[in-house]
Image (cartoon, rainbow, N blue to C red):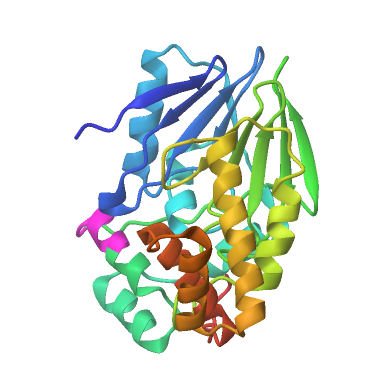
Amino acid sequence: MKKELRRLKEHIFYKDPEAETDRPIVAAICGKHQTLIVDAGNSPQHAEGFLKELAKEHVANIHMLVLTHWHWDHSFGAKQLNIPAIAHEETKNALERLIPLKWSNEELDQRVAEGTESSFCAEMIKKEYGDNRNITIIPPNITFKKALEVDLGEITCIIEHVGGDHSHDSSVVFVKEEKVLFLGDCLYPDMYSEKWNYTVDRIEALLDKLENYDADTYVMSHQFPLSKEEFLHYANLLRHLANLTVATKGDKEEMITTLSIQLGRDLQEIELLALTYFVNGVHSTQVPVSK
């Protein structure tokens, strides 16, 4: 199926995520004077395709890029964009640590065996790049510690560091006038542990920050945008599972039984998956790489 460029709001375009090679949503926020790109995509081909589709919509004045976190699928297209990039200071540090690495099948497989690379990410890199592994890491040249405001001309973006289990450097982008919150991957689990997981403290702290935003549309990078109602439903599920994790000390069967009784039905796949991530987080073993 052809992945499309869509208009989310009057001033916001985005390109569909592509699960086949783990391409996340990439977006353009268009102000009167400047356009801000949200995430660079997972390869030069991904970034170039996005630029071509923006050109068809006559999107101009593409001046800046913001990276929501350091992971390959959000950052490896930066060279193709060739514009100044903004990110949290830890995003820059993490990307600089990737610069000396090599990306052949052998090198990727070795890092997976050593526990310093995610097997999922390694397989997706192989699929996205094929035999052409000419990967150039471009760290951001503008960094911040807590938050940054960008005026694009009658459109204002608030970029804030929020952290989370998925990647400690995660930032969100809030488009004030459009009430859109780009979440990046911050609500997804930690992938760099023996088992993918959520931790109670990090999830609760993250949700506290996200719920402060006056948004009506929420964009998670690997799925289609959520309404406020859909986001709050998922946020409430995560809070409830965090409480259950504490109450049961992460006993999976007890959590499943309790939640099923409370809901009056069997658990749906997304509920069981999130529950399992919390269980895994009780006794997680993180591999020695920057999250």
Q: Is residue 233 shown left or right of residue 160?
A: left
Q: Is residue 115 shown left or right of residue 35?
A: left
Specify the quadrant of the image occupied by residue 202: bottom right
Magenta residues, start to end: 124-131
* Majority secondary structure of magenta residues: helix
Residue visible at 44% across and 11% down in the picture: 58
Can the viewer see residue 100 in this picture?
A: no
Q: Nearer the viewer, residue 91 or 255?
A: 255
Question: Is residue 15 shown above or below 271?
Answer: above
* The C terminus - image quarter: bottom right
Percent across and percent down for residue 30 are 58, 20
Specify the quadrant of the image occupied by residue 166: bottom right
Residue visible at 42% across and 21% down in the picture: 54
Q: Nearer the viewer, residue 80 or 271?
A: 271
Percent across and percent down for residue 131 are 20, 60
Count of all numbered marks drawn on residues in the image: 0
Can the viewer see residue 80 in this picture?
A: yes
Q: Nearer the viewer, residue 61 or 170?
A: 170
Q: Nearer the viewer, residue 218 or 3?
A: 218
Residue visible at 53% across and 87% down in the picture: 285
Question: Is residue 188 shown above or below 210?
Answer: below
Percent across and percent down for residue 159 are 71, 41
